[in-house]
Amino acid sequence: DGLPFPSVVSYFGDRKIVGRKAKELLAEAGANVIGNTVRSPKTLLGRGAVDVEGVRRNPRDIVADVVAWVRKQALESEYAGKYDTAVVTIPVDMNGTRRAELREAFRIAGISVQQFVHEPLAALYGHLRSQREFPKNLKELEGELILVFDWGGGTLDLTLCQAVDGLLVQIR
């Protein structure tokens, strides 16, 4: 059903369009601020206010708009629940200031961040969970080193992981 949701938000005065509909409004490809539309707002965290079509906006608030919209979609879905806590994936290079701003954006959107997980480790976990016999496969990996290649947003992150006592551990 059009998942996942693109991290894109367009502003029309007080009105916001988020997700796929906002992405469809983009006349050109690119990241960050394009006219009244912000793409990949998480990358703007830690930079101070940005100009969006003549309006100064805090990147934290832009991220909060995206998170609030996704939360609203979840609350209205057939899988309705509380959705007031989350485990959030982050790039490996996201520093403390940017993490704090991301945590605050989620708080503004009504969600408490329980934990941050680096994106490559989350990708490995997601890959293993998608396999038919996840517990058996994880057990077979016990002690093995696993190198995860994470391409995204113009970067390449290499993360060395290991299966230890039934857990995936990020080594380096």
Image (cartoon, rainbow, N blue to C red):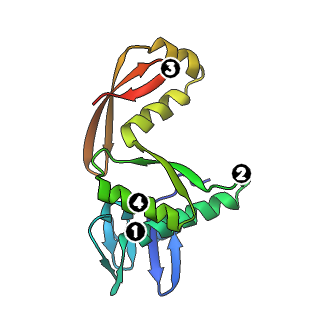
Residue 26 x, y percent position in the rendering = 40, 71
* SS label for mark 4: helix
- Give yes or no for contact between labels 1 and 3 (Cβ–Cβ under 8 Å): no
Q: For the point 54% across and 29% down, which residue is it?
A: 129
Task: Please tell me whether residue 170 is drawn above or below residue 63 in the rendered image.
Answer: above
Query: Does 9 sit left or right of 2 as displayed?
Result: left
Please give the residue where the numbered disc 1 appears in the rendered image.
60
The answer to which of marks 4 and 1 sits earlier in the sequence is 1
The quarter of the picture where residue 168 lies is: top left
Q: Are marks 4 and 1 in contact (CB under 8 Å)?
A: yes
- Distance from label 1 to label 2 (Cα)? 27 Å
Q: With 78 as the anchor, is 7 left or right in this view?
A: left
Say what amino acid the circle numbered 1 marks: Arg
The disc label shown at residue 166, or none: 3
Tell me what residue is drawn at x 68 percent, y 56 percent.
82
Point 40% across, 68% down: residue: 60
> Whole-Å distance between the Cαs marked 3 and 2?
29 Å
> Against 98, is 160 above or below?
above
Quadrant of res 150 = top left
State yes or no: discs 3 and 2 in contact (Cβ < 8 Å): no
Q: Would you call the spot at circle 2 few (<14 residues within 10 Å), some (14-19), or many (20 or more)?
A: few
Q: Earlier in the sequence, mark 3 or mark 4?
A: 4
Q: Which residue is mark 4?
A: 102
Asked if one can make out residue 19 in the rendered structure from this viewpoint, the answer is no
